[in-house]
Amino acid sequence: MKLTQTAKISLILVLSLSAYRGVAQQLKLSAEVETGLSKVDTAQFKADIAYLADDKLKGRAPGTEGFQMAVDYVVGRLKGLGVKPAGENGTWLQQVKFRKAFVQNGALSITSNSQSLKAGVDYVIMPNPYLPDVKLSGQLAFAGYGASEPELGYDDYAGLDVKGKIVLVTRGAPDKFSSSVSAHTMNATTILKAAADHGAIGVIICSVDSTSRLNSPKSGTYSVKNTDGSVAISRTYYSAQVKVLGLFNYALFNSLLQQSGKTMAAVLAAIKGGEPNSFAINSSADIAYTSTYQDLISYNVVGKIEGSDKKLKNEYVVHSAHLDHLGIGKPVEGDSVYNGAHDNASGVASVLGIAKIYNGIKHKPKRSILAVLLTGEELGDLGSGYFTSHPTVPVKSIVADVNTDMPTIIAPLLSVTALGAEHSSLATQVDEAAGYLNLSVEPDPEPKQARFTRSDQYSFVVNGIPALHIKYGSKTADGKNNLNDFVAKWRAKYYHKPQDDINGIFDFAAGKKYAQLNFLIGYLVAQDDARPTWNKGDIFEVK
């Protein structure tokens, strides 16, 4: 029997959960490690969050004085916990050179459209971080979701010639894809790469919602530069070949479909059902625009806890969390400082808690541990993108990443979901660690949130390193098992708002358990003689 990708992943989850039920009670820890686990202090956890989310840090935006204060604080805490520097040139830091790009003098016209198109309303052109002046013309072609995953039985580019053309796509994925695979294929970088691989010179992402407005990047978009000025990592740029990334509104997209004898309902139904429906459009676009730039410097913080095995200590398990937040922005209820207490001072506090556990363990695991506190997550996982493509240790020596981003410690932690673990053997360590702490492991309760690609573990995954991100499950103490409903209400009030400060809702005991769980997962990986592996045939398996 041939299984669909969704069925394969469901089977993996079932087997993992079965393994958890069968072996979780067999996990035995040394007395030293058990004692170390108890060293996570909820009072210190709260103190770390309170400092990092204090108004004086002004929201920890990369490149600001407040972010530097956060860097100095975590370096001091890591030093005090016996962690050694593992950044560039023997320091604690890795320099990250951000480029903020803006569009000026943008213009777009379509040969089949006699009306004048209005920038910001009918279309949006994203700034180009590498090419300051762009002028091009190209025939249009529709390429469905812009997904090219033949190993999963789906390829929007099959039989479609897009060489030298501008590709129109819509965001989404076939229903048969799992939540993490869907999130990956609809990620802008994945779409840009597929277009470039097939010879396209531009990508336009089209809206299928007649009520939505285009999101114009008036405040600019961010990338990271290499030392030679080229683009190291970007979420809106892939290569100099694809010179344009833009957006079309519903009306413009719909008119182009109708011109091609198609209806939007029929096209969307086909691709959602897993049947590619791509075609050439008998029209061309002329696009010209200028990009201007502002550059700034920020830092990743990297510390090391050396392993005990003569050979395996040269391999690393990463515990990561992003240190940045949104800085100062639009006032909400009179407050303009976006403190980021949950997002992600709590994740940083968790990594510091893990360092505290290791500080109390004399006999370190076989592999070394890296504590990596990242910049630029709020700008598109850019600090992690730079670290994973330019690591301060040999890239092949990094065996896994356990990431913590906004664990949302607002209620007792009774169950978890391990975003990304279903793709690799890390599911085994998750089940063992969760079982030890009497936590059940569940599938993602909020698959439409696309959480798998929205934080730093994704940068590790796309660079071939098995990674995961532990989030809350649905279980609640009252048995209603609807924690995600409570989180949704919390998110509406606090997420990416100034109200996310130390005065909000917190359950610091849940924070302690997150740190213990993430420690155990990393510790088990660090102790295992075998490196984590991708599941055979997985979309992220290194070919």
Image (spheres, helix red, strand yellow):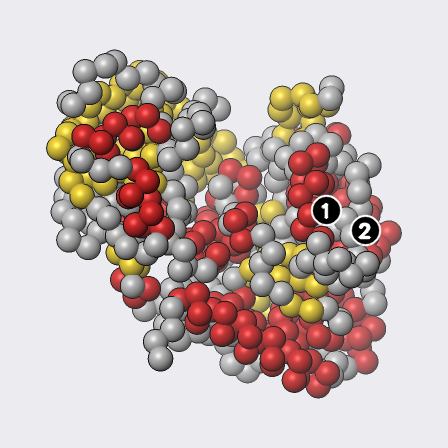
Q: Quadrant of residue 256?
A: top left
* Residue at the farthest right position: 43
Percent across and percent down for residue 377 are 54, 43
- Circle 1: is it few (<14), some (14-19), or many (20+) Cα within 10 Å? few
Which residue bears the numbered disc 2? 507
Q: Residue at x 45, y 51 (%)?
A: 183
Q: Quadrant of residue 207?
A: top left
Q: Are marks 2 and 1 in contact (CB under 8 Å)?
A: no
Q: Amino acid at mark 1?
A: Phe
Q: Amino acid at mark 2?
A: Asp
Between residue 494 and residue 88, name the one nearer to us.
Answer: 494
Residue 55 seen anywhere in this rendered image of the structure: yes
Up the image or down, 442 lies above or below 103; here it is: below
Between residue 537 and residue 40, name the one nearer to us.
Answer: 537
Give the Cα separation between the discs numbered 2 and 1. 14 Å
Which residue bears the numbered disc 1? 486
Q: Secondary structure at mark 2?
A: loop
- Circle 2: is it few (<14), some (14-19), or many (20+) Cα within 10 Å? some
Between residue 225 and residue 22, name the one nearer to us.
Answer: 22
**Rendered image: mark on residue 403:** none
Q: Residue at x 24, y 34 (%)?
A: 257
Q: Secondary structure at mark 1?
A: helix
Q: Quadrant of residue 326?
A: top right
Q: In this figure, what is the number of numbered marks?
A: 2
**42 lies left or right of 143:** right
Which label's residue is closer to the chain start, 2 or 1?
A: 1
